[in-house]
Image (tube, rainbow, N blue to C red):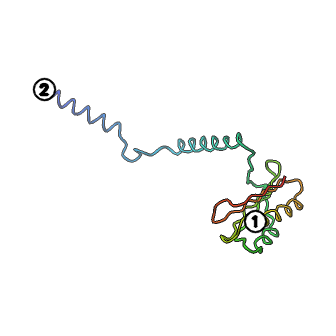
Amino acid sequence: MKKYLLMMLMLLLAMITIMGCSDSESENQESPETENEESTEKESEEAAEPEKEQKVVDKSESAQHNEDIEKEMLNEEGIVDVSLLITEDGGGYVIADVEVDSAMDNATAKGIAETYANKLKEAYPEYSVDIQTHKSGEPFEKVTVE
């Protein structure tokens, strides 16, 4: 009888321990506060890394677009898409990403990039101008005018 009671007591304690340690609904879930804290820490760490390596251009509220020059560039033969960003952050930059046709050669792409880099530098003389052409999504030619 004593063995029986001891075994039942151990079984009862084991069940209480197992049930007390498990929570079936939120077993692998974290609280929203913990998730927010972790994501904020990761974002701040990621934001700090690029600042050490190079100047960071923040595409924030101060960013502008020049739709006239964008349209002019899009009318150029061989240009498929243009993204033009003018920002005062980081000392002032004019950044253009230009997707060119897959049939375009390096000399033509570089010529177009140089033409529009000079045109943008005239329009924004105190800004650094950077034009990056892409061919099939890959970087192709780059022109920078300080």
Q: Residue 18: x, y in percent?
A: 30, 37
Question: Could you tell whether 33 is left or right of 48 in the image?
Answer: left
Is tag 1's residue or tag 2's residue first in the polypeptide sequence?
A: 2
Graded by Cα atoms within 10 Å as few (under 14), some (14 to 19) or many (20 or more), the crowding at tag 1 reads: few
Q: Residue furthest left?
A: 1
* Cβ atoms at labels 1 and 2 below 8 Å apart: no
Number of residues whose C-alpha sits closer than 10 Å to that of mark 2, classed few (under 14), some (14–19) or many (20 or more): few
**Mark 1 to mark 2: distance in Å?**
92 Å
Quickly name the residue at label 1. Answer: 107
Counting from the top left corner in percent of width and height, residue 100 is at 70, 68
Amino acid type at mark 1: Ala
- Where residue 43 sits, quadrant-wise, is top right
Q: Is residue 83 left or right of residue 8?
A: right
Frontmost of labels 1 and 2 is 1
Who's the residue at 73% across and 44% down the image? 54
Indicate whether 78 appears above or below 93: below
The residue carrying mark 2 is 3
Q: Secondary structure at mark 2?
A: helix
- Please, is residue 72 above or below residue 85 in the view? below
* Image coords of residue 84 (percent x, y): 76, 62
